[in-house]
Image (cartoon, rainbow, N blue to C red):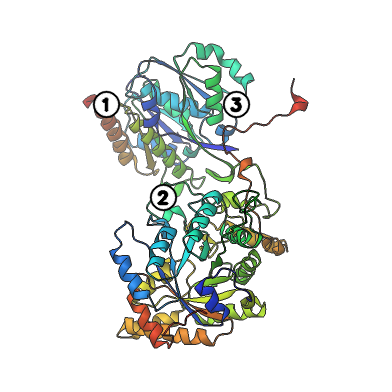
Amino acid sequence: MIVAEQKPITDILDMLPEGKRILVVGCDTCVTVCLAGGEKEVKVLSAALRMAKKQFDEISGVSIERQCDGEFIDEIREQVAAADVVLSMACGAGVQMMSDFFPDKPVLPALNTLFMGSNEGAGYWMERCLGCGDCVLDLTAGICPRTRCSKGLMNGPCGGSENGKCEVDPENLDCGWNLIYQRLKSLNRLDAMMPIRPPQDWSKSHDGGPRKLIREDVQL
Amino acid sequence: MSEIKSDSNLEKLLAKGEFVVTGELGPPKSVDMSVLDGKIAALSGAVDAVNITDNQTAIVRISSIGTAFYVMARGLEPVVQMTCRDRNRLAIQADLLGAYLNGARNLLCLTGDHQSFGNHPQAKQVYDIDSMQLIYMVKQMRDEKTFQCGEEIRNNKKSDIHEPRFFIGAAANPFADPLEWRVSRLEKKAAAGVDFVQTQCVYDMDCFRRWMEDVVARDLHKKVKILAGITPIRSLGMLRYMKSSVAGITIPDSLIERFEKTEDVKEEGRAFALEQIEQFRQMEGVAGVHIMAIEAEKTVRGIVEDAGLLPRPQAA
Amino acid sequence: MADSILIMHCKEGAKRALARMTEEGYKLPARFKTFELPCTGSVNEVLLMENLQNGASGVIVLGCRKENCKHMDGNLRAERKVARIKKMLSEAGVEGRFVEMVFAAPDEGKRLHDTLLRLAHAGHSEGKEK
């Protein structure tokens, strides 16, 4: 899922124009799961904005299934029309789509979108995937060398791996290549460590303009 | 190691079977060359070639290539260092052509310290390729005479091929984890095309010895010239700091005890370095030493002399 | 509703503490309202914020003594939730309202009474001064 966190409320307040009608819009999918922008967070933030020192005309709040899909944005057209500014609590994709749908209103981001990741435990999410467009997880025993290695090496580990930790943060950061090595070892597949993996094709990653995916078989 | 690939002095000496000595120096942080001039003077004649570091610990200094030209003009053969952190494959290949054009022949292919260690932690890291892919690419340029993309290294279809021919080096760390895999990593670098390696500085001679035995058992010393790293100990604080805070350096407790008991740490450090050099000369598979005496370059000549390694031989 | 203080308390140690306090003769002024929770760990931030927004001067989350939570660490989680809300309110420049976490033991009637009144007064005066 996409993991995001709320901007500090000071930053949010700086963005919002005084005296205006603000519509706070949440998203019930990824940002609900990571406790950043769901229905509950909309209510808490709205209450804080109503009590804030900076005064606004009116604060309304609503949450929709997803802000990255037009069919759900359609449902709140009237509420948006009745506001001057939209404060979106969705990830960057949602904020942008909302902005496309309502080009005449400022649509502001209440969150900083962080990464594609997994829930590792209560209140703990970790980055897993960069969206590089060229998945090599079959070669590395299901552990991504781009996200888990601080240098994104394809032929690691480097000399900075010690006691299974990465020298960038020896207390908290596992050496990604040590994880790969240990898992390959337990799968009896250490042979996978020897081939020299060639340079990545970065043209499949984000390298100029937004990437697009078209499925002709489902287009109308 | 039969035919000479690069014409470098270092390569020729190694091909002759000489026990080589390389040194290291870090470029200055500005274009004030006064300190560097002193280091060049200290190392001239004491070493066969000198590594020029490249934005070491991600702190900005004059580039390795830029400094290499300065050093060459003053009679010292450089080992240019190229890291993967700051440049993509285009910049690297372009820089290599430029370096070769201006006389550089030895190249050390490194991953590069993470930018968070340096003075520009907010910079975007590159790592377009890693050190293994870099070795392969430099070898491809030299032996297949093509760029990484496969194009021939020539001005146009009618002109001759003029490829850069480097003596390719890399770092090797017998002490980093996973320990059991470190010889395999050297094997992988050998397969990628490395000609010589310099190891991380050695303090645990037993551990190093075991690594060398494994290297020799796999015949790797015949494909790759191995230079053992030495950093002479100059203070107890330095030793303790390395033990506690530097990844990839192993220091046995017995060595700490030895230096805790001694009255003159610098003299003891010198003595230990000389013992090490003697042991490396006896060890099968070790083709030379790489002395990293950063900010103590003036001590190198004395150590090399007392080890009986002066004068340095001339290549044919 | 204005100037009211809401005490959100658990039904275990905090409830007993409030009962004990009353039995011992320490009564709270009428503006104090109470709201019972199974455990302060489950305190609903939306409810807390909306009470403040709708005019309450303050919300006190009253849990068991730190080591005494029946659900192990519910009161500690409540403390962290309260800390987060306090920070948000402070950064937003919210005036005249407060949120506090209090840990109460069942046998400290007078002390609990004094603490609650002190918090209410301090929160109230802070608002008035500004």
Instruction: Give the label on residue A68, or none.
Output: 3
Q: Is residue B16 above or below residue C3?
A: below
Residue linked to disc 2: B121
> Mark 1 is on which residue type?
Gly
Please report contact status of discs 2 and 3: CB closer than 8 Å, yes or no. Answer: no
Q: In this view, does A201 lie above or below A43?
A: below
Other residues around mark 2 within 10 Å, as few (<14) / some (14–19) / many (≥20): few
Q: What is the quadrant of residue B230 in the picture?
A: bottom left
Label 3 is found on which chain of the structure?
A
User: Under tag 1, what secondary structure?
Assistant: helix
Residue linked to disc 1: C127
Distance Cα–Cα, label 2 vs label 3? 33 Å
Label 1 is found on which chain of the structure?
C
Distance Cα–Cα, label 2 vs label 1? 43 Å
Q: Can residue A150 be seen in this snapshot?
A: no
> Mark 3 is on which residue type?
Cys
Distance Cα–Cα, label 1 vs label 3? 42 Å
Q: Which of B69 and A59 is in front in this view?
A: B69
Give the image location of residue B41, x and y in percent: 33, 73
User: Under tag 2, what secondary structure?
Assistant: loop
Q: Nearer the viewer, residue B112 or A96?
A: B112
Residue B12 appears left or right of B115: right
Residue A177 appears left or right of B120: right
> Mark 2 is on which residue type?
Pro
